Image (cartoon, grey):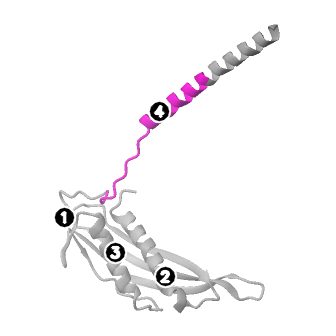
Amino acid sequence: MAWNKFDNSKRVDSKRVNKSVYRFLVYSFTCLLVSCTISYSFQGGKLNYDVVKTITIQDFPNRAALVYPPLAPAFDQALRNRFIEQTRLMPVDNNGDIEIEGEITGYDVQGTAVKDDAYASRTKLTVTIRVRYTNHKEEGSDVEQTFSAFREYDATRSLDEVQDGLIREIVDELIDMIYNATVANW
């Protein structure tokens, strides 16, 4: 009988400890949630809309040595859409408070991942864009930068087979980089 009493008291103590640990964890987690807050804003983080109201986005001519004709219009439209949809700027044809211009400077295809037989097993498509971002209302926020993005694809496929899909992905990535470097507060 004495053995059972000892065993029961040990169980009672372990239940108390488990409840205390549980309460401590719940309390700690609650404090952590209350004290940590994350705030996101996708509405043109660095722009002062009291000062900057309009944007002019010029067409980006394709000056790459290798030209894929649908690239320039796809890029131009995607760039305009991003700035119009994610900022409160009004698009104007000329003399915007912000002006974005530039050119497509590279459209390159090269083999990568060479196999034992000296043939490439992967091919890389790279697009390079030079951008000039001018904010006429806020000094010190101008950007002149070159952006580049690439995608690899299996070398057994032709560029014609994969080009349209790769261009969509590359253009999306380039637009993200340009937007983040100019008006987003990242």
Q: With 115 as the anchor, is 164 left or right in this view? A: left
Horizontal relation, residue 26 to residue 138: left or right: right
Question: Which residue is at a point 35% across and 68% down the rendered structure image?
Answer: 143
Q: Position of residue 55 (x, y in %)?
A: 23, 71
Q: Residue at x 74, y 88 (%)?
A: 118
Which of the two discs, 4 and 1, sits closer to the camera? 4
How far, Cα to Cα, is label 4 from label 1? Answer: 43 Å
Q: Which residue is mark 1?
A: 53
User: Which of disc 1 and disc 4 is earlier in sequence?
Assistant: 4
The residue closer to the viewer here, 180 or 10, is 10
Q: Answer with left or right where residue 111 lies relative to residue 45.
A: right
Q: Which numbered disc, 2 or 3, marks the residue that appears first in the sequence? A: 3
Q: Which residue is mark 3?
A: 79
Q: Residue at x 74, y 83 (%)?
A: 115
Q: Mark 4 = which residue?
A: 30
Residue for point 44% across, 91% down: 68
Q: Is residue 128 above or below residue 3?
A: below
